[in-house]
Amino acid sequence: MNKQRILNPRPSGTREVSKKFLIMVEGTTEYNYFRRFVKRNSKLKVKPLQSKRRDAVSIAEACVKRSEEYGISKKDGDRSAVVYDVDQNTGDSISKSEEICKRNGAEMYISNPSFECWLLMHFQDVGGGCTQDSLEDSLTVVLGCRYEKSNEINGKIDDTKIREAISRSSKRICIREKRNMDCLKTYPSSTLHFLVGDILDP
């Protein structure tokens, strides 16, 4: 009598189906930057925030709403993250924003003062005395023409540059759990190395 063949539903050597990963961003520059990673993972979605108000609490609330619309479920292994700039937000409002995100299973990543800080880290260390204007001036030098909030800077950024940015940023903010509050205390800085690192090395 022939033995019945037992089928393994997940053959050895195969990977689990990747979970949904939604990244919500505040601006066009951020959207263009994170879109590069969609080619690496078809489950990754990058969407602009749908919120007329740009205060930290409204951004968090918009993130939670968008996550629900896309059926993101942390218990199923899905992830949602929101990316925004500190700008004029106070420490108290950013703390409340983080509480809203955590309570609803979302992640929050910020740059202080702006996303340009993270972009410049792809090319050089960012000193403590810089301003938003000097960040943009330095990016102009890197780009070879006037820096605008557009897609042009992405042509200068490859995986090597991304890993350099992760390395530079991690020297300023090194504890993931305290990242956003530490970012507020460290000018300039960014917590995006944690998120981008996860995308590069899932």
Image: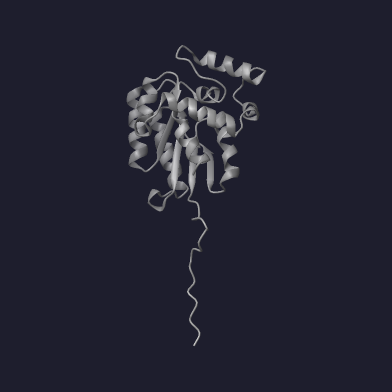
Q: Residue at x 49, y 25 (%)?
A: 168
Across and down, in percent, residue 177 comes to 35, 34
Q: Relative to residue 64, is residue 34 drawn left or right?
A: right
In terms of depth relative to the viewer, which is nearer, 45 or 123?
Answer: 123
Above or below, 100 against 189 in this view is below
Residue 49 in view of the camera:
no
Please, which colouring scheme is shown?
one colour
Q: Which residue of the protein is positioned furthest toward the bottom in this rendering?
A: 1
Q: Residue at x 36, y 20 (%)?
A: 185
Q: Quadrant of residue 29?
A: top right
Q: How many marks?
A: 0
Above or below, 193 against 135 in this view is below
Q: Which residue of the protein is positioned furthest toward the top in this rendering?
A: 129
Above or below, 71 against 114 in this view is below
Above or below, 54 against 20 in this view is above
Across and down, in percent, residue 48 comes to 52, 36
Q: Residue at x 50, y 51 (%)?
A: 18
Residue 197 in view of the camera:
yes
Across and down, in percent, residue 15 comes to 51, 55
Across and down, in percent, residue 197 comes to 49, 36
Q: Relative to residue 57, is residue 123 drawn left or right?
A: right
